[in-house]
Each structure stands twice: as C-alpha cells, then as structure tokens.
Image (spheres, rainbow, N blue to C red):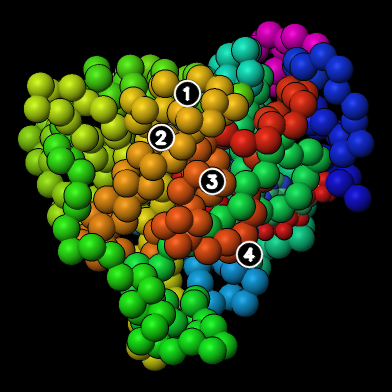
Amino acid sequence: EYKFWRTQPVTKFDEKIDDEGSIDAPKTPDEVPDHPYPLLKEFEWDTLDLNDPVQITEIYDLLYANYVEDADETFRFKYSPQFFDWALRAPGCRPEWLVGVRVAATKKLVAFISGIPMHLRVRNTTLPSAEVNFLCVHKKLRSKRLTPLLIKEVTRRINKQNIWHALYTGGVILPSPVSTCRYYHRSINWAKLNDVGFSPLPPNSTRAKMISKYLLPAKTSLPGLRLMERGDIDQVYDLLVTYLSKFELAQVFEKDELLHWLMHDHGLNGKSNDANDPDRVIWAYVVETEKGAITDVVSFYKLPSTVLGNAKHDSINIAYSFYYASSVALEAPSRADVAVTAKLKARLIKLFENALILSRDLDFDVFNALTLLDNPLFLDELKFGAGDGYLNYYVFNYKARPIAGGLLPDQSL
Ligand code: YNC
Ligand code: MG
C-alpha cells in the first residue's frame, strides 16, 4: 500500500502533528540531480511549449481522451486550448514545469504533469510553492508505475528552482489530505441535466416541478453589478486579499497574478473584454457603488463536460465558482459573531443568486461550488445539492494540522 507515497515527504495517515513545518531537511538546488530520471527506453521526456498551438493540441487530445471521468464513465472534462492558456500560463510560469512523456519511436504524447508557481499560506507561514495539476497517463499505459516517475521528475524540476513545497488536489485519497471539500451542484438547465442523466427525477416529483424549482429571476438585482475591467484591479486586490486573510489555507497573490486569474487576457493586447466571447474561460463581476467604490467581486470559470453516449446532447456547460469577496465579510473577522455572519450570509446569497443569473444568461447548464471559503453560508439557500464528489487538498513536504474550511479554489477536479 502506497509503495511510492511512503517514500515521499508527506504526512502519514495516523501521524500526530505537534509542530507544523517542512518534513525534509533544507536542501539547495545544486544537491538536486541535473538530469531527468531514467525512463524505460521506449519512452522519452519532453517539455511542452504552450507557444506552439500543435503542442497545446497534443495536451488537449491526451486529456480529452484520458483524463478524469466519473464512476459511470458518462462525463469527462472537456478542457479547451484557451483553458490551458489560462490555467498554465500564470505569471512566472516555468516552461520546463510542463512535463510530457512521449513514445520514443512515434513521438506520441502519452503522459503529462504540470506545475505553476504560487505562494501558499498555511496559517501564518507563506511557502514559495508549485501547484501541480493535470497529471494524466494514457489509458493503455495505466498501472505501469509511470505516475511516480512523473511526480519525481516534476519535483526535480521544481526543486531546481529552489522550491520545495507544492499544493495538489484530487479525488483520490493519498497520505494525507490537509483538508477535504465536497462538491455541490446548482442546476440551471434542469431539463437538460435530466436528459443526460446528471440530475435524476426525484420520486414524487415531476419534470415541470423540477424545472420551476430551479427557475431564476429574469434579471440581476444588485445595483452596480458589472463585468470586471482591468482598471478595477487595485480595489479588487485589496478586497480579496483582506478577505482571504481570515482563512487558514490560501494563495498569497501578487497583483499581476490576481489579474491573470480573474481576467486572463481579456482587455489586454487589443483583445476586447467581452462577456460573450465564445472562447472565454473566466468571468469576474464587481459591484460598484455610485461613488465608484467596489464592494463585492464574484467569479466563475468554464469547464464543460463531454457527455458520452447520449443521443440528445454531447456536452454540458459547467460554471465553477472561483474567487469572490464582499466588503460585508470584512466586518466579520471571526465566524463566531452571529449578527455579522447573518449579514454576510444574506449578502452572499444575493451575490451568488446574481452570479447564477449571469451564468444562466451565458448559457451554463449547471453551477458547481465546493464547501470552501464561506460557501456553506449560501449553498442550501440557493438550492445547490450535495454531489458524490470530494476534493482532497494536499501540501507536499509540509506537515500541518487538518484545516476544516476555508481553502482556495483551483482548476482541478
Ligand atoms: C493522483 N491523482 O497512489 P502508491 S489530480 C497522486 N495523485 O502510488 P501508476 C496518484 N498520486 O499508492 P496509473 C494519483 N493517482 O503505490 C494515482 N497515484 O504510492 C499514485 N487518470 O502509479 C498511486 N488525474 O502509474 C500509486 O498509476 C501510483 O497508471 C501508481 O496512473 C494514475 O492532477 C493516473 O485522475 C492518475 O491519468 C495518472 O489513472 C491515471 O493508474 C490517470 O501505476 C485520469 O500513483 C486522470 C486523473 C489526476 C488528477 C492531479 C494532481 C496530481 C498531483 C500529483 C502529486 C504531486 C506532488 C507534488 C510534486 C511537486 C513537489 C515539489 C516541490
Ligand atoms: Mg502507469
């Protein structure tokens, strides 16, 4: 059991944690091997170049056919080239952290793992880190222990940059999650979700009743709600950074990083900031007062799922809740303050009801959210239903006591 993971600097399942901190003794990059780990001779390492559309397509094709499916194999993530451009080209990204394995004879890409740089705060400690994601091995090469090699190779390349910690998430249980969140789903187009088998018709209900249950108001209701513009970043940054400071596990952003995560390249280099751009992956909206103060921000990203073997629909359009903040939350430094929590709850219900209306107008079929940040305050009220999926959060080379709620959203399942 956990033959590979037992050898790695991660907390054991039964480990009792007194002092939080790094697991390995400190090292320097020159102690790290200069050359990649050996592979079986039919395979070779490669570095994927996102400036080359052909290579983006290769990553896309590998993940499209071989990435995460649900247990019944009906749905599969439908990552787009634009999605990778957003998720993998964060400020400071290192080209060599996009690791591929190719078949030596044919050069076919058969495995992939990625890292991007980030700063991760675990309680009061901020760690220069990598976020590791999009681990994928071709279906025909499963159970051949390629995964430990991919992990060791990406670790080597990250360590070479003097970075010794990483954040990663997954549906699988490994030693040991620092936290676990549950997926919640809010139907927007219930009829379509029912057609594809995502939302069963409950006993004692009817299609008409279910459709009307999920009806949303015709128009948004928050005065001053509008698409975020690049010029909003100073206010949005202050709001979000202050909000995130109350959580025990969070990303520490530089301003350019936050701008990337909320706006990608919209409104940059001659590209318009158009909510209806068909290639758009990330939407952020702000609430602005008449005096120009930004009081709230809410965002969601698009990651459709392919529907396998359905006569009527070949995909569902899914919005994933991403970063948000409200000035109301800043009044509530502690969750124990009942009155302020009630006020925050009311505000978040309004903010996310508006986000649901916007996503309906953008043609999303379902809006997903995890039980992180202050999400538990609005999920039930807005008719999100608990899903089957859980997302485990892991920190590499760092032991930390479990963290109950309040985590960062990311782009993986
Ligand atoms: C997984 N998801 O336990 P043991 S999430 C980590 N994350 O090792 P083989 C995983 N480890 O138990 P297969 C893992 N899944 O013997 C399996 N493992 O110690 C471990 N699926 O290797 C597993 N993407 O190659 C076992 O397994 C060992 O052929 C077995 O391939 C697994 O991106 C996989 O779900 C997941 O493509 C690649 O099933 C394959 O079965 C697949 O024989 C569909 O591997 C797609 C999928 C995973 C999405 C993700 C986060 C990845 C995090 C990796 C860990 C990073 C650590 C930090 C490194 C940087 C450090 C610094 C500084
Ligand atoms: Mg394998």
Q: Which residue is mark 2?
A: 343
Q: Which residue is mark 1?
A: 332
Q: State the separation of the CA atoms marked 4 and 1.
A: 31 Å
Q: Are circles 4 and 1 on residues that touch, CB within 8 Å?
A: no
* Foreground tag (4 vs 1): 1
Res 54 visible: no
Q: Which quadrant of the view contains residue 229? A: top left
State the residue at coordinates (62%, 43%).
169
Image location (x, y in percent) of residue 76: 50, 67
Which is more toward the observer, 287 or 96?
A: 287
Which is more toward the observer, 40 or 17?
A: 17
Q: Earlier in the sequence, mark 1 or mark 3?
A: 1
Three-letter amino acid code of the residue under disc 3:
Pro
Q: Which mark is residue 388?
A: 4
Image location (x, y in percent) of residue 365: 34, 68
Magenta extent: 25-34
Point out the residue furthest to the front here.
339
State yes or no: residue 229 in magenta.
no
Q: Are circles 2 and 1 on residues that touch, CB within 8 Å?
A: yes
* Foreground tag (4 vs 2): 2
Badge 1 marks a residue whose secondary structure is: loop
